[in-house]
Every structure is written in structure tokens, then in C-alpha cells.
Image (tube, coloured by chain):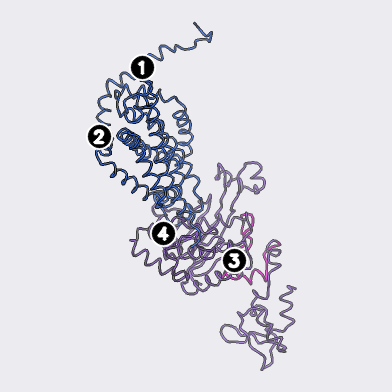
């Protein structure tokens, strides 16, 4: 069957060339890349083991501590504690902790990579023009497409799952870092220049702190997107709650899928609460009123 | 009045894609309107020459769009000129590289902004210490010096407040303290009091004059308010459409406006408060021996009370103690009516 569209160039040959090129990369660089990502793998595994080995109440206490540190308010702390215990009651504690480990790693790496890119975009219009379409593509390309090269490079496992998650989840951090810094009051930036701030001092004493609420909104979105990736990532060996959902599909067990799905929802709420209460506190610091 | 602190020589600023090319066109005679229409470049400043002396308050005054905010930003190179030279203590600041410029901004010039431009996420004392911390001064020392400046502007007790918790007047005092804290020789004040309400504004003007008397800073003050200019300025430069129309003391400008624009500008001023007796004393007239004596640098307004008390003439005494002449009510009225 042909579509009748004139064949100006040979797509099959192009496809073959691309595959061959990629295969060469896999053959030559596969092992090196695996070694490079070994520490990351160790980190995720360590985090996962740690969260699973610690008694549940220690983990709950840890989360409460972090929530308090983020927002200095009691209500979110209580909400987080209750939701975590619900996770335990649902019987998916260990799976949830595996998911938390992968998600945290993905979020941390997204921030570590995304923040500098966002900062770079905010300072250079040319870089921004170049990056925006790339970010659009990253967000609209079906996620499964990323899985192929990553699985080829690393084989099924946590690392390709992590990398695919990062590619999918990183755009909001980058976009909102760029946006946040560009929205900072130019007079305040000018004041810092007038007092002799170097570009780096301008960035860290004025631009990043004042862009923080926006950057936090980006990090929050990134966390949510990372969480939404867990089911798909579990297809290539991420494990955790996503794998339970996957099993539910394979075995046609409604209960298994539903419980694991609920667990993902609970995790989403927990992380959203933490991020939001932090965001609110930062925001309040910037616009304090009254005495 | 001491030596020249800041010297501006032939500074021009053109905004647009090709400032240098546009400036060449201006130099060969193209005017501002044609430049805008034909080349889409904006002539911000044209051929400005100024000398600002050590220890004076130099006011640059003009309406919005006159280029005054652009000009003041040249003194610490927040804006780079398209042409001309700017000398600070005889040193060409345009030749400074990035590092030198940073040091210059940290130690030699400080700036106060119209809308305060405080760091909203930092407390009052952190804001005041900002310039010092940028310069690498250790925190205890920076806070100690910041504390002194906070006391100087009368904000003791508010060190740990955040800017948004303070009123406009208090915020601008923080702005002033921040500028004073680095111990810079020159303060650049960009419409520093324009956003304040009239009473607070007057307080701040008085406080600035008082501080200036004590600290002897060189202050470049931008304003669109002629009364403020006349009250504060030892010298006043009047700027319109990016060109200087007149530079002089307040009473020089009032007594002899350089052109129509300046004349119209100063028309509504309370001349009695600005013009000085010395300039109008009639040297050919000798006041009666028992006539009240008034200093040459007293304002005409200050003669009103004596005339109201029935004096026919006042003896005007120069700064060196000589009697320079006499003032009659008629002479004062003529000066006020500008005949």
C-alpha cells in the first residue's frame, strides 16, 4: 500500500542508518554509561532500602519533620502523617517507598539539571529561543518513545526508568525557573547592580530568592509529573506502586490496580502538600504585611 | 565647595540598534524627531557637560522624558554612554573593567531609588548591610556598621522588620541608610522622595540637608519638583529633551533664566523664598543708622517681618561684615514681580 505521497527521500534507509548509529553507541558506550550511572543507581537503591528497612513510624516522623521544616505549620504535618499511615493500611508500604525513592531521585536530579538550564535561559534570549521548542517536544513526545533508547542503553531497570522520568518531568522546573527570574522586579536587580553585585551575587542574593515561589511551583509540577510516570516506568523495571498497577492489568485484578492507584494518589497529595506549604511560606516572606 | 568630584564631558546616549551610527547622524545635524522617525533611534542625552563639586548637593531637574534618570545612571555606569567621558576624581570610569567597576560601585558611589528597591526577602538590617556584604565585609562587622546607619536615620528598633512592614517614608530611610552604610563619597538619589507624601517628603528633605551638613557627602539628586530642587540644590541643572538648558544656583536661575523654557518653568516659584537679599541690595542707597540689619544670604521673604514692623529700609550685611547696601520695600517688590 502506498499513500501516493511522492517519495523524495528514502525513509527506510534513514531509519536503518539511525538504528545502526544508535546500535554503535550502545555497543561502544553502553558499558561506560552504565558505570557512570552506577552511583545514581546505588543512591536510589540505598534510599529505597533505607525507607523500607526503617520502622514505619520513623519514616512517618521523618516526613512530618520535613513538612514542618517546609511550612512551619501544623495542619499540613497532620495531613501528611495521616495520609502516610493510610498508605500503610492499604498494604502497599514497601511498594510506596520504592516509588518515593525513584521519585525523589528523579526530582532531585531534575532540579540539579533544570535549575542551571532555567537560569541560563533567563539570561540569554538566544538560549531561550533554542530551548523552548526542545521543551515543547520533550513534553509532547509520547513517553514510550523515550523508553526505547534508554532500555537499549541500560537494559530494563531503575536507571532507564529514572532517565525517562527525568526527560518527561524536567520541563516545568526549567520553564518556571526561567519565568520566575525574568519576572523579578528589575528595579531591585538594578539596585543590586548599583551596589556592586557581581552577576553571581545578583543571581543568588536577588534573582533566585525572589523567583523562589515560581521555581517552587515548577518543582511541584515536576514532582507530580514524575509521579504520573511511575506506571509507565514500571514497564521497564521501575518496580514500586506502578508495578502493582501493571500486575493488576496483566492479571485483570481490579483490586490490585485500584489499591496501588490509590497509593499513587496519596503520594501525590503528600508531596503536593509539602511543596505547597513551602511555597506559601516563601511567598509570605516576600510580601509580609502588618507588624 | 571643594574640588570637582564628577566631571561629565560631552556625554551623549542614543538608544537603538546602532547607537554609534545614530550619534554620528546627530552630530552632523539631525534632530531628535527626525532621528526617531527615520532611524527609530531615541536620543536620550545630547552632549552633556557638567561639573559636580565635592560636598555639594547637585540637583538635576527635569520633567519625565527629559533624560534625568538616564543621566544619573551614567555616574555609576548602570547605563553606558554612547559618547563622551565621565571622570570621577579625575579618573575615567568608562575605562574601568568589570572588576574595577564592581569595586567602584561598592565603595565610591551608592544609590537611592524612587521606589526604594529594597530586597523584600531581607530584614531592614540585612538590607542596610547589603552593600557591605557584597564587598565581603564579615557579617558581625557589616551588621555593626549597618546598625549605626539605622540609628542615624532614626529606625532603631526596626532592624528585624521586613520592608513590607514599614511605611513608605520608613522604607526610604532604609534605602538611605543602605546607601550611607558603604561610606561612599557620592550618593546618587533618583527621585528619592517623589513617591512619598508631602509631609514625610518635607521631613526627609530636612533630614537629608541635616545629614549632608554633618557627613559632607557629594549628593547628586534627581527631581521633577522645582521647589525640591531649589530647597536642596547648591547647584541645579535643568534638563529638557536630553539637553542641558541651564546650570547654576537656584537664585541665579530664578534671577536670569537662560531661555524661555527655564523662564516658564520657574514662573510659579515662590521667589521670596529663593532669592537672596544680597543680589538685590541697592549699593547707592544708605539705610538710616538705626535701620534693621539683614544678612546678604537671607531670603527676600525674611525681610517681610521687618517691613511689616514699619522699617523704611533694611541694611544688607555681606558675609564679611560690610554693609553692602540697602533694601527698600519697593526694591523687594520689584524683585518678586520680576520687572
Q: First in sequence, mark 1 or 2: give its number.
A: 1
Q: Residue furthest bottom?
A: B290
Q: Which of the two discs, 1 and 2, sits closer to the camera?
A: 2
Q: Chain of mark 1?
A: A
Q: Chain of mark 3?
A: B
Colour that chain B carries in the picture? purple
Q: How far is mark 2 from mark 3, CA to CA?
A: 70 Å
Instruction: Judge whether B265 appears above or below B295 on screen.
Output: above
Q: Position of residue A78 (x, y in %)?
A: 39, 47
Q: Chain of mark 4?
A: B
Q: How far is mark 3 from mark 1, CA to CA?
A: 75 Å
Q: Which chain is blue?
A: A
In front: B288, or A2? A2
The residue labelled by disc 3 is B236
Determine which quarter of the picture holds residue B251: bottom right
Residue B130 numbered tag: 4
Q: Pointer 2 and pointer 3: residues touching (CB < 8 Å)?
A: no
Are the numbered discs 2 and 4 placed on the same chain, yes or no? no
Q: Which of the two discs, 2 and 3, sits closer to the camera?
A: 2
Residue A19 numbered tag: 1
Q: How far is mark 1 from mark 2, CA to CA?
A: 30 Å
- Range shown magenta: B231-260
Quarter of the picture holding the C terminus of chain B: bottom right
Question: Dot 4: what SS?
Answer: helix
Q: Residues within 10 Å of mark 4 (few under 14, many from 20)?
A: many
The residue labelled by disc 2 is A42
In front: A283, or A243? A243
How many numbered discs sit on the rendered protein? 4
Q: Residue furthest top?
A: A1
Q: Position of residue A241 (x, y in %)?
A: 35, 31
Q: Is residue B331 left or right of residue A94?
A: right
Amino acid at each position: 500500500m502506498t499513500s501516493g505521497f511522492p517519495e523524495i527521500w528514502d525513509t527506510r534507509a534513514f531509519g536503518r542508518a539511525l538504528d545502526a548509529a544508535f546500535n554503535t553507541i550502545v555497543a561502544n558506550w553502553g558499558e561506560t554509561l552504565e558505570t557512570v550511572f552506577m552511583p545514581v543507581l546505588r543512591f536510589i537503591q540505598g534510599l529505597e532500602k533505607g525507607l523500607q528497612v526503617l520502622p514505619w513510624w520513623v519514616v512517618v516522623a521523618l516526613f512530618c519533620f520535613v513538612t514542618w521544616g517546609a511550612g512551619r505549620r501544623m495542619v499540613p504535618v497532620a495531613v501528611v502523617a495521616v495520609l502516610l499511615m493510610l498508605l500503610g493500611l492499604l498494604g502497599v508500604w514497601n511498594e510506596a517507598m520504592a516509588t518515593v525513592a525513584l521519585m525523589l531521585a528523579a526530582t532531585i536530579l531534575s532540579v540539579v539539571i533544570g535549575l542551571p538550564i532555567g537560569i541560563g535561559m533567563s539570561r540569554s534570549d538566544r538560549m531561550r529561543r533554542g530551548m523552548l521548542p526542545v521543551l515543547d517536544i520533550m513534553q509532547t513526545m509520547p513517553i514510550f518513545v523515550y523508553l526505547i533508547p534508554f532500555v537499549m542503553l541500560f537494559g530494563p531497570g531503575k536507571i532507564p526508568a529514572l532517565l525517562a522520568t527525568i526527560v518527561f518531568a524536567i520541563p516545568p522546573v526549567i520553564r518556571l525557573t526561567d519565568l520566575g527570574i525574568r519576572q523579578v522586579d528589575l528595579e531591585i536587580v538594578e539596585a543590586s547592580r548599583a551596589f556592586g553585585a557581581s552577576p553571581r551575587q545578583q543571581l543568588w542574593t536577588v534573582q533566585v530568592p525572589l523567583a523562589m515561589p515560581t521555581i517552587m511551583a515548577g518543582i511541584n509540577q515536576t514532582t507530580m509529573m514524575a509521579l504520573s510516570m511511575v506506571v509507565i516506568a514500571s514497564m521497564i523495571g521501575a518496580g514500586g506502586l506502578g508495578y502493582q498497577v501493571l500486575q493488576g492489568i496483566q492479571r485483570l485484578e481490579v483490586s490490585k490496580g485500584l489499591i496501588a492507584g490509590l497509593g499513587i494518589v496519596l503520594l501525590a497529595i503528600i508531596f503536593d502538600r509539602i511543596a505547597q506549604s513551602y511555597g506559601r511560606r516563601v511567598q509570605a516572606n516576600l510580601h509580609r504585611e502588618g507588624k | 565647595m571643594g574640588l570637582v568630584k564628577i566631571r561629565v564631558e560631552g556625554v551623549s546616549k542614543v538608544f537603538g540598534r546602532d547607537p554609534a551610527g545614530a550619534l554620528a547622524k546627530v552630530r552632523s545635524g539631525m534632530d531628535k524627531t527626525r532621528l526617531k522617525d527615520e532611524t527609530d533611534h531615541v536620543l536620550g542625552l545630547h552632549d552633556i557637560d557638567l561639573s559636580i563639586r565635592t560636598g555639594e548637593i547637585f540637583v538635576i531637574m527635569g520633567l519625565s522624558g527629559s533624560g534625568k534618570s538616564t543621566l544619573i545612571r551614567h555616574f555609576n555606569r548602570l547605563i553606558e554612554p554612547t559618547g563622551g567621558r565621565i571622570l570621577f576624581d579625575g579618573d575615567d570610569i568608562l575605562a574601568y573593567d568589570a572588576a574595577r567597576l564592581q569595586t567602584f560601585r561598592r565603595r565610591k558611589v551608592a544609590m537611592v531609588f524612587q521606589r526604594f528597591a529594597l530586597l523584600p526577602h531581607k530584614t531592614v538590617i540585612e538590607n542596610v548591610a547589603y552593600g557591605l556584604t557584597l564587598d565581603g565585609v564579615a557579617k558581625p562587622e557589616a551588621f555593626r556598621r549597618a546598625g549605626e546607619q539605622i540609628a542615624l536615620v532614626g529606625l532603631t528598633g526596626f532592624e528585624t522588620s521586613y520592608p513590607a512592614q514599614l511605611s513608605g517614608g520608613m522604607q526610604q530611610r532604609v534605602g538611605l541608610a543602605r546607601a550611607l552604610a558603604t561610606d561612599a563619597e557620592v550618593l546618587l538619589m533618583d527621585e528619592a522622595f517623589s513617591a512619598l507624601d508631602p509631609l514625610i517628603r518635607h521631613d526627609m528633605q530636612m533630614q537629608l540637608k541635616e545629614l549632608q551638613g554633618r557627613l559632607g557627602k557629594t549628593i547628586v539628586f534627581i527631581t521633577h519638583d522645582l521647589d525640591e530642587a531649589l530647597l536642596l540644590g547648591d547647584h541645579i541643572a535643568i534638563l529638557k529633551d536630553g539637553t542641558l538648558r541651564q546650570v547654576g544656583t537656584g537664585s541665579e536661575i530664578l534671577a536670569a533664566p537662560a531661555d524661555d523654557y527655564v523662564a516658564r518653568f520657574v514662573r510659579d516659584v515662590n521667589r521670596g523664598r529663593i532669592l537672596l537679599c544680597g543680589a538685590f541690595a541697592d549699593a547707592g542707597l544708605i539705610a538710616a543708622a538705626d535701620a534693621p540689619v539683614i544678612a546678604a544670604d537671607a531670603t527676600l521673604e525674611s525681610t517681610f517681618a521687618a517691613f511689616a514692623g514699619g522699617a523704611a529700609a533694611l541694611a544688607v550685611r555681606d558675609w564679611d561684615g560690610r554693609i553692602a547696601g540697602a533694601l527698600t520695600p519697593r526694591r523687594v517688590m520689584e524683585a518678586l514681580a520680576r520687572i
